[in-house]
């Protein structure tokens, strides 16, 4: 009887399109710093020194030091239950992850559709031909790393003042969502933050974070850690299907 009920249940589960929109908070419990919480990256580094094209022109070594540090940190962290729960949702639903993060924890957590808005630490690109990309060097990026045309290799990161990547695709995905789950973002950097308003009125909208200055009024706010709250919500969505 149990198997029959199971097969009946799964056959009646209507797959939904779930769009998950994440920020640094989803990786906090893996041990990666967020930006604006206490102890965040922007407490120890100035954005204008390490995360703008002007910084790269003025002191490229300082910029490389910053990103080599962040890339190295990836080697000692693992995806946390939030990353795994997001990947689990793919068992019964169509899931698209739109992330502001540049770490590889959604990839390693098993998600298969990931859109990076702010670039990633997985690759580096040529300063003069952004389509020329190679994996981020294990030994760290140095000023001697050059592309075939002699240009400096730079982190494949969208710096402040540069155009966000995959933005139109992200809007399209949100506009087709049945459920939108926002996790671990202060919604303080645009245009990424504006994506929360792209979801259709009928979509079920939830945001999981700790202290938030701004909560979109059509989102249900769950105050708590991603590692604890995302698995709870995901198991509810998988149970009811
Ligand atoms: N679980 C859930 N949420 C958390 C956790 C946690 N364990 N820890 C922190 N948070 C929440 C905080 O409440 C905060 O709202 O995550 C958010 C982190 O906010 P930010 O540090 O501003 O990170 P993020 O929103 O991703 O920053 C956006 O800013 O500097 C740029 O390009 C950078 O992509 C980044 C963008």
Image (tube, rainbow, N blue to C red):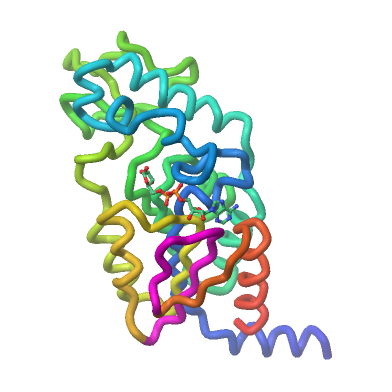
Q: Is residue 205 magenta?
A: yes
Q: Give the quadrant of residue 123.
A: top left
Residue appearing at x 38%, y 58% in the figure? 187
Question: In screen coordinates, is 59 left or right of 115?
Answer: left
**Residue pictured at 55% horizontal, 47% vertical:** 27
Q: Is 15 included in the stretch rendered in magenta?
A: no
Please, is residue 99 above or below residue 142 in the view?
Answer: below
The image shows residue 95 at horizontal and vertical percentages of 47, 66
- The percent coordinates of residue 194 (x first, y second) are 29, 63
Q: Which residues are magenta?
A: 202-217
Task: Please state which of residues 81 and 194 is positioned toward the viewer in this rendering.
Answer: 194
Exactly how many numbered labels are in the figure?
Answer: 0
Q: Position of residue 190 (x, y in %)?
A: 27, 54
The residue nearer to you, when weighing 227 against 4, is 227
Residue drawn at x 82%, y 86% is: 2
Q: Is residue 48 left or right of residue 183?
A: left
Identify which residue is drawn at 59% across, 68% down: 91
User: Which is the main secondary structure of the residues drawn in magenta?
Assistant: loop
């Amino acid at each position: 009887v149990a198997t029959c009920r199971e097969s009946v249940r799964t056959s009646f589960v209507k797959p939904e399109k779930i769009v998950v929109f994440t920020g640094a908070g989803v990786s906090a419990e893996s041990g990666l710093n967020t930006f604006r919480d206490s102890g965040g990256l922007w407490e120890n580094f100035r954005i204008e020194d390490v995360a703008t094209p002007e910084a790269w022109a003025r002191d490229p070594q300082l910029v490389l030091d910053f990103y080599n540090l962040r890339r190295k940190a990836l080697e000692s962290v693992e995806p946390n239950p939030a990353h795994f729960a997001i990947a689990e949702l793919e068992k019964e639903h169509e899931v698209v992850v739109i992330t502001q993060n540049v770490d590889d924890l959604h990839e390693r957590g098993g998600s298969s559709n990931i859109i990076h808005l702010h670039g990633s630490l997985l690759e580096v690109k040529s300063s003069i031909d952004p389509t020329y990309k190679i994996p981020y060097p294990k030994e760290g990026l140095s000023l001697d790393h050059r592309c075939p045309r002699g240009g400096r290799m730079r982190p494949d990161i969208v710096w402040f003042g540069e155009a966000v990547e995959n933005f139109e695709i992200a809007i399209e995905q949100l506009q087709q969502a049945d459920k939108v789950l926002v996790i671990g973002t202060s919604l303080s950097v645009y245009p990424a933050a504006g994506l929360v308003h792209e979801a259709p009125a009928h979509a079920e909208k939830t945001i999981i974070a700790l202290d938030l200055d701004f909560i979109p009024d059509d989102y249900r706010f769950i105050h708590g850690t991603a590692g604890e709250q995302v698995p709870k919500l995901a198991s509810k969505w998988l149970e009811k299907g």
